[in-house]
Amino acid sequence: MDQKAGTAIYEGSVLVRQGTIEIEADYLKIFSDPTSGELKRLEAKGTPSKFRQQLDETGAMIISEGDALEYDTVASKLELNGDSYLKRDLDEIDAEYILYMLNDETFRAENRGQGRVNMTLQPAKNEETP
């Protein structure tokens, strides 16, 4: 742990919980603001690394995993690399790379080699007007 640089490295069977976020990994590097101690970014590696977050008060969850992940709290984005999977409600994505923007719930998925991006997306719910 380097408090002046605002970094900490954890190795082994790592489990981190902060609020509604949970991360599991074999290796975790945490970047925080050296002055305030506020969390800025997490880098995780594992087989797989896992990220979960409750999205709202209804209990809707985002569940994801990949060989490596990066969670940027400032930009509110989650990047998954290598054998990646993301599930939000009933929507599911499998790809080599997934970028998920948590604030606006948008994503980009790519296979950077051979293979396919596989998605199961549910239709948007229509709101009926009285």
Image: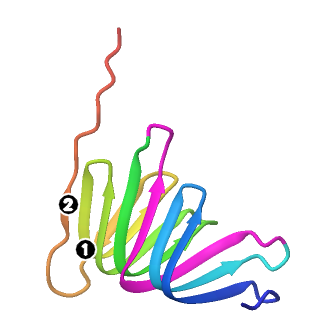
Frontmost residue, 95 versus 23: 23
Kindly indicate the quadrant of the structure image that contains residue 63.
Answer: bottom left
Residue 48 quadrant:
bottom left
Q: Where in the figure is residue 70, as x and y percent of width and height?
A: 49, 77
Measured in 3D between alpha carbons, the distance from the residue under mark 1 to the one under mark 2, in whole angstroms, is 9 Å
Which residue has dot 2 on it? Answer: 119
Between 16 and 3, which is closer to the camera in this rendering?
16
Residue placed furthest toward the top:
130
Residue at coordinates 42% horizontally, 64% vertically from top-left? 100
Task: Inspect the magenta stretch and tell me whether residue 52 lies in it.
Answer: yes
Left or right for 77, reference 30: left
Q: Magenta part of the protein: which range?
A: 36-58
Residue 86, percent across and down?
A: 32, 64
Most extreme residue toward the left is 115
Q: Would residue 31 be found to the left or right of residue 56 on screen?
A: right
Q: Which quadrant would the C terminus be assigned to in this image?
A: top left
What residue is at 32 percent from the left and 48 percent from the top?
A: 89
How has the structure been colored for display? Answer: rainbow
Secondary structure predominantly adopted by residues drawn in magenta: strand
